[in-house]
Amino acid sequence: MKYILLYLLLICPVYAGEDMATWQVRDTHSSIKFSVAIEGSPAEGEFTGFSADIDFDPEMLDQARVDVRIDLNHIEAFYSDVADGLKKKDWFDVAQYPTARFAGADFIHLGDNQYQLTGDLSLKGVTRPEILYFTLTRYDPHRAVIKGRMTINRLDYGVGQGPWRSLSTVAGQVFLDVVIDATRKP
């Protein structure tokens, strides 16, 4: 009997559940794009340099976490001079704050394949809680894909100073559209 008990104690952890899934972002299939109204017209761009540490399993949301780092030196915009201007002091001040970061572990399943993630967005020396709403469009043992949106107020982070602080020129509301396509790490 004690051998059976010892066997059960040794083998049960294997069947107690799987480890949290850890994911590697597929760079060429993933994106973080932004859009904002400038003088009433939509303007778009993309943060092309980012990395992420992702631990996610929809069955283990209490253990899931995400940590995304965006290299603000890599911005593409509708006009190249706009991309260069966004790096200057009045905007992202990349010389002093080269990286933005979004880190969170507060996932909520909203039903079907809809989720929300509350995390801390750090941008230009300011850290504030923000919410990413996303759809899990694919999830299997080898690959996961999400499409999501976060809406922030640029003025909360001091983005757009001087003449650009006026909301009559550049809207305060900025939309971040996120697509993360990832493969499971072995």
Image (cartoon, rainbow, N blue to C red):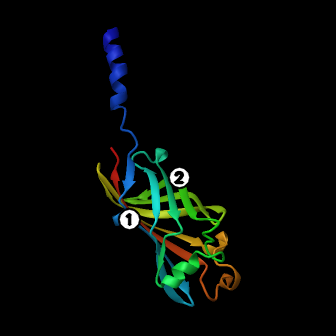
Q: Is residue 121 left or right of residue 6?
A: right
Q: Does residue 161 sit above or below 132 in this rendering?
A: below
Q: Nearer the viewer, mark 2 or mark 1?
A: 1
Residue 106 rendering spot, x and y as whole percentages: 53, 52
Label 2: few (<14), some (14–19) or many (≥20) C-alpha neighbours in 10 Å = some
* Residue sitting nearer the eye, 10 or 109: 10
Contact, mark 2 vs mark 1 (Cβ under 8 Å): no
Q: What residue is drawn where x is 64% and y is 78%?
A: 160
Label 2, secondary structure: give it: strand
Q: What residue is drawn where x is 40% and y is 43%?
A: 20
Q: Does residue 14 sit above or below 128 in this rendering?
A: above
Residue 90 rendering spot, x and y as whole percentages: 66, 77
The quarter of the picture where residue 99 lies is: bottom right
Q: Which residue is mark 2?
A: 106
Residue type of the residue flagged with mark 2: Asp
Q: Is residue 28 left or right of residue 51?
A: left
Q: Which residue is mark 1?
A: 30
* Residue sitting nearer the eye, 118 or 185: 185
Label 1, secondary structure: give it: loop
